[in-house]
Image (cartoon, grey):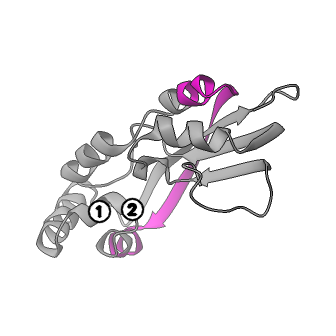
């Protein structure tokens, strides 16, 4: 879509929603600029993403890899501004509370794409590291999301 190689049912779009995917973009600036060109005047792009750092109870190697791959939401807002959109950034945080064994099963199932970088043996060692760092039966940790909204001015034309 961003490169114009996919036909769309409408010439311009009112809204584009990107949820927890921007970290997979090879070139976020070019992709967001290409998507911005598809917006109708007053159209919006909403990028829902995790922040550049997280306080999840993961093993250190997974957290390090996450930080290497996750773009900073402020950088995403800057890309939207560079594409000609007005951009704002807000954060929402809530506490997650999960039984530890349920969470460890999620880690084993690679509930976050960053965990796909680790083979089964490394995941099991990581789970042992999590167990050692968190002896409690229930895990409580903050889940923080960034919402980056870019809006094309009503009088804008492309």
Q: Residue at x 67, y 27 (%)?
A: 87
Of residues 21 and 32, the one nearer the viewer is: 32
Identify the secondary structure beneath mark 2: loop
Snapshot quadrant of residue 59: bottom left
The quadrant of the picture occupied by the C terminus is top right
Q: Is residue 70 left or right of residue 73?
A: left
Snapshot quadrant of residue 118: bottom left
Q: Residue at x 38, y 72 (%)?
A: 106
The residue to which callout 1 is attached is: 115
In this view, 95 is above or below 41:
below
Q: Position of residue 138 (x, y in %)?
A: 42, 64
Mark 1 and 2 residues: CB-CB less than 8 Å, in contact? yes
Please report the bounds of the magenta region as a residue range: 77-105
Q: Residues within 10 Å of mark 2 (few under 14, many from 20)?
A: few
The quadrant of the picture occupied by the N terminus is bottom right
Snapshot quadrant of residue 55: top left
Q: Is residue 68 magenta?
A: no
Q: Residue furthest right?
A: 155
Q: Is residue 28 left or right of residue 16?
A: left
Q: Residue at x 17, y 75 (%)?
A: 120
Q: Position of residue 85 (x, y in %)?
A: 69, 27
Q: Residues within 10 Å of mark 1 (few under 14, many from 20)?
A: many
Identify the secondary structure beneath mark 1: helix
Q: Position of residue 91 (x, y in %)?
A: 61, 35
Q: Is residue 118 left or right of residue 147?
A: left
Res. 11 mark: none
Q: Residue at x 23, y 61 (%)?
A: 117
Of residues 152 and 111, the one nearer the viewer is: 152
In this view, 89 is above or below 70:
above
Q: Position of residue 101 (x, y in %)?
A: 35, 74
The residue to which callout 2 is attached is: 112
């Amino acid at each position: 879509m961003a490169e114009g190689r996919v036909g769309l049912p409408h010439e311009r779009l009112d809204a584009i929603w990107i949820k927890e995917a921007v970290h997979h973009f090879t070139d976020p600036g070019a992709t967001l600029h290409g998507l911005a060109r598809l917006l109708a005047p007053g159209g919006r792009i909403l990028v829902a993403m995790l922040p550049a750092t997280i306080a999840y109870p993961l093993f250190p190697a997974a957290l390090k890899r996450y930080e290497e791959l996750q773009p900073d939401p402020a950088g995403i807002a800057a890309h939207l501004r560079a594409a000609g959109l007005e951009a704002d950034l807000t954060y929402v945080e809530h506490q997650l509370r999960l039984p530890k064994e349920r969470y460890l099963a999620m880690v084993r199932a690679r509930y976050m794409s960053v965990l796909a970088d680790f083979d089964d043996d490394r995941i099991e060692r990581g789970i042992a590291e999590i167990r050692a760092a968190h002896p409690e039966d229930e895990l409580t940790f903050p889940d923080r999301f960034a919402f980056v909204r870019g809006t094309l001015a009503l009088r804008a034309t492309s």
